[in-house]
Each structure stands twice: as C-alpha cells, then as structure tokens.
Amino acid sequence: MTVREILKMGDPRLLRIAPKVMAFDTDELHLLITDMLDTMAAANGAGLAAPQIDVDLQVVIFGTNTVNPRYPDAPVVPRTVLINPLITALDAKVENGWEGCLSVPGMRGVVPRHARIRYTGFDQYGDAIDRTVDGFHARVVQHECDHLMGKLYPIRMTDFTKFGFTEVLFSNLNILDDD
C-alpha cells in the first residue's frame, strides 16, 4: 500500500492541465491507480484525480461502494476508474451543493454543478465507459474532472458566504440549511 502526498490549494502544480493517457493496461498505469485508491481510502475521500498527487495524466477515481464518513448522507457511488473523461451536460438544470476537497482540507463550500450529465471515457484496460448520472454521482464526477483542467472547487463558487471551515459550518447548522 502506497499512500501518496496530496497537493494542497496554493500549489501551482494543481493549476496545470493534464494530458490524455496514451497507453492503457500498463504496469505504470495500474500502479498509479493502486496508489490513488490507497491514497483516497486513507483520506476518506469520495474521489481523487491524478494531478492531486502530482501526476499529470487524465485519470480520476471516485466512489466508495460504502457510506463515506466525509459525506455520510450522500448515496453510495460505484467505485470507478475514469480515464480521458468527457462530460456532457444533459440539460440546463444546475444544482447547488456542498463540496469539500482533499486538496482544500478542512473546508467546504456551495458549488453550482450540472444536475444531470453523461460521462464517457475509459477504464484502466482501455474499455469504454458511458454513463448517464445525476445527483451526488454527477457532482463527484464533475468535481474530479475539474482537477484535470487545473480547477479547484472554490473557482466554481458564486457565493462566498457559503464557504468556510467544515467544523465551523457544521456547528452552525442554520447556514447549511439555507440551500
């Protein structure tokens, strides 16, 4: 098990645009994914993008197959390896929702995201993935794929009165109930 260091907001390496993966089913790619899964599990994450561990490739993982302690009220999202993703919004509906990030530890903010999306890409073996999702699943995919474009969730926020330290926000439940 290899748990890698997760880069934190402010590190310029998080702002780079990741190139596509060109070779699938390689030892290097499998090792990267194993390290990402170990790192995500150790941090109780709902997802992780390769750029967060200083690997400039279009690789994201997400899902837990169990209830996530950082998102106890969220539905389970199937564990997925998604490479070279493409996201298409399926309608104009946007939903606001609370997000956190392993690269922005201890903080949460309300982020607008497309409510329903289709995402395509490949798994680590080069097999095609094509899914239509909504809700928390759609939010997690969009969040992780933003990392591949050098974007952290605060960049997407429109109301900074709903941004702060998790421990403060959750101790003041009336702020969380304003959504």
Image: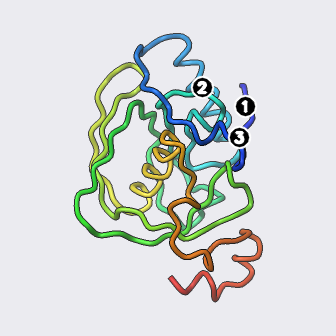
Residue 40: name its quadrant.
top right
Residue at the extreme top: 27
The residue that appears at 55% across and 68% down in the rendered structure is 98
Q: CA distance from mark 1 to mark 3?
A: 9 Å
What residue does disc 1 label? 4
Q: Is residue 148 above or below residue 98?
A: above
Mark 2 falls on what kind of element? helix
Mark 1 falls on what kind of element? loop
Mark 3 touching mark 2, by CB under 8 A? no
The residue that appears at 29% across and 69% down in the rendered structure is 93
Q: Is residue 138 left or right of residue 104?
A: left
Q: Is residue 178 above or below residue 128?
A: below
Q: CA distance from mark 2 to mark 1?
A: 11 Å
Q: Amino acid at mark 1?
A: Arg
Q: CA distance from mark 3 to mark 2?
A: 18 Å
Tell me the quarter of the image containing the N terminus: top right
Q: Is residue 145 left or right of residue 109?
A: left
x then y, percent, for residue 16: 56, 36
The residue that appears at 54% across and 10% down in the rendered structure is 27
Q: Is residue 88 left or right of residue 144?
A: left
Mark 1 touching mark 3, by CB under 8 A? no
Q: Nearer the viewer, mark 3 or mark 2?
A: 3
What residue does disc 3 label? 7
Q: Nearer the viewer, mark 2 or mark 1?
A: 1
Q: Which mark is residue 34?
A: 2
Q: Is residue 8 above or below residue 35?
A: below
For marks 3 and 2, the one nearer the N-term is 3
Q: Amino acid at mark 3?
A: Leu
Q: Is the residue marked by circle 2 packed among few (<14), some (14-19), or many (20+) residues within 10 Å?
A: some
Q: Is the residue marked by circle 1 packed among few (<14), some (14-19), or many (20+) residues within 10 Å?
A: some
x then y, percent, for residue 41: 66, 41
Q: Nearer the viewer, residue 159 or 23?
A: 159
